[in-house]
Image: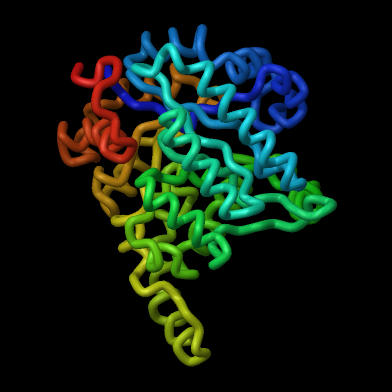
Amino acid sequence: MRGKINFEEAFELPTLADSSREQAALYIAPKDLDRYIDHIKHPLGERLQLANSHGIGYTIYSLTVPGIQGIPDSSKAEQHATTVNDWIANEIKDHRDRLGAFAALSMHDAAQAAAELERCVRQHGFHGALLNNYQHAGPDGETYLFYDQPAYDVFWQKCVELDVPVYLHPAAPAGNYYKQMYAQRKYLVGPPLSFANDVSLHLLGLVTNGVFDRFPKLKVVVGHLGEHIPFDFWRINHWLEDVERPLAVGRGDTMSKKDLLYYFKNNIWVTTSGHFSTPTVRYVADYLGPERIMFSVDTPYETIENGVGWFEGDEDALTRALGGEDGYKKVARENAKKLFKLTKYHDCDA
């Protein structure tokens, strides 16, 4: 199928890509590292050719991990975010029928993040923001700023005003957190476990701390078919509703007003990025329907060949899992068209 929309597609400034080789080695097999380095610093070229040859009509790029969230100094983080956003805007400007971008933001200051997001949306036509989980802060980078606190309401309000989503993306554990939790479990860093653990904590914090209640039109995207949360829907919801909510009432605390599935069906989208499993898609679709799932690959960490090869090679089984051809098309492009307000782009009607 042509005209698919692909996002969670990472890039790095060319001047920094080679220096990030050590971190890339956490996620990339040694034999594949050269391909990764070449692709992450060249959003055009071979990556654009691969997208076209595999029926991807539109790609949305975002700064790779740890991105701005890994910069603990607020002024440096803000300056680098501006540099990154202007660089990718310039790279894609001659291919806007094929390419878009998410804003990279410093989340040290919610008002400044809101202002930079607005600049990127209005000036560059970006499709929202991608945040690499919590913001590292403090003199040693060991302070973690989560966006589920009231101090970030000014940022979420701006997202609603602009009507753009935020992609909550993982980042690797660092500093003392890495030393204590993963130094002796290093092969669990990234997709095997740490990514899902950290993003799940943050996303469920947004839910239980009432962010979606304060901003009912807020839109958040998470990758990898929901960072393990869908596979624990029943248990999480059971405890939130039958145990935690009565406890919150007794303590006089504020907690989310709706059940967990409500927010996944009204505020949260999940993507297939890096999770090319038809049985898993079927499971998630049984809970959420095809309307809340979007195709994505996660290059250059994964490859377009593998992601599209699964999505098209298993089309019949996926179509059945998604309730028919209409559901398959929704996941391939129609849901993303609506969320990102894409009208005309390459092969959009193919």
- Is residue 197 in view? no
Query: Can you tell which quarter of the image residue 151 is in?
Result: bottom right
Q: Above or below — where is 159 with respect to 80?
A: below
Q: Is residue 77 left or right of residue 147?
A: right
Residue at 26% from the left image edge and 26% from the top image edge: 315
- Is residue 270 in view? yes
**Residue 48: image location, x then y, percent:** 45, 12
Q: Is residue 11 left or right of residue 343?
A: right
Residue at 65% from the left image edge and 57% from the top image edge: 145
Q: Quadrant of the N terminus?
A: top left
Residue at 31% from the left image edge and 24% from the top image edge: 4
**Residue 210: image location, x then y, percent:** 44, 69
Number of marks present in the image shown = 0
Q: Is residue 40 left or right of residue 232?
A: right
Q: Quadrant of the C terminus?
A: top left
Query: Can you tell which quarter of the image residue 128 is in?
Result: top left
